[in-house]
Amino acid sequence: MPKTQIRIVDSPVGRLWLAAEDGWLTELRFGGEEICARPDGVNDAVLDAAERQLAEYFCGERQVFDLPLKPRGTPFQLEDWRALREIPYGETATYGDIARRIGRPRAYRAVGMANHSNPISIIVPCHRVIGSDGSLTGYGGGLEIKRQLLELERKWKQNVEV
């Protein structure tokens, strides 16, 4: 039976709840306040790497995450989440773009539902998906966090390109 290790880390967009099993990152969710006992001091290489890479991301030093991921989902969700990881840092795509990328051009609503179920936020960047009119639409962490993540990426990307 796999043993789940949990860590809560603070970030510029609030607390993040990380979970790992057997050398794989399985979850990154917003929040953490709902966990009664804060599991500080857990020594886990994947959680250590995830925490370090997230700090680098928020400081503009990392654009691509290099972590072993094992999200749990349906075959469609897994395909969607792979496509999300192809959206370049600091850029956006629409739900329709992702649907076409995975070969299901009419499945833009299903893409939205799969994004909503994304268990590894930020690292699997569903925040980079916007409405066809350019508007910010649903995000598990809330639209304000989505806006903050997109602004952070644009800011750091502009600094690198200058």
Image (cartoon, grey):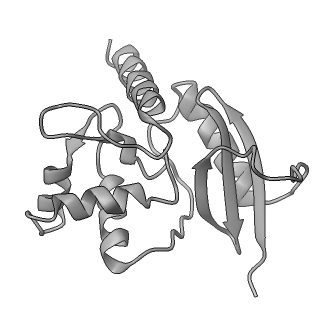
* Nearest to the observer: residue 84 or residue 119: 119
- Identify the residue shown where x is 75% and y is 49%: 34
Name the residue rendered at 41%, 33% in the picture: 143
Q: Position of residue 79 (x, y in %)?
A: 31, 70
Q: What percent of the width, then of the height, locates residue 126? A: 37, 48
The number of callouts visible is 0
Viewport quadrant of the C terminus: top left
**Quarter of the image where one finds residue 47:** bottom right
Q: Residue furthest top?
A: 162
Query: Is residue 161 depicted above or below 6 in this figure?
Result: above
User: Horizontal and vertical percent for residue 148?
Assistant: 45, 25
Q: Is residue 73 left or right of residue 102?
A: right
Instruction: Using the image, determine if residue 68 lies above or below residue 57.
Output: below
Residue 40 screen position, x and y as percent: 89, 48
Q: Residue furthest left?
A: 105
Q: Quadrant of the N terminus?
A: bottom right
Q: Is residue 156 left or right of residue 134?
A: right
Taking the spot 34% from the left edge, 17% from the top edge, the residue there is 158
Residue at image location 44% in from the left, 74% down from the top: 73
Q: Is residue 89 above or below residue 118?
A: above
In the displayed structure, would residue 5 be above or below residue 145? below
62 vs 76, left or right, is right
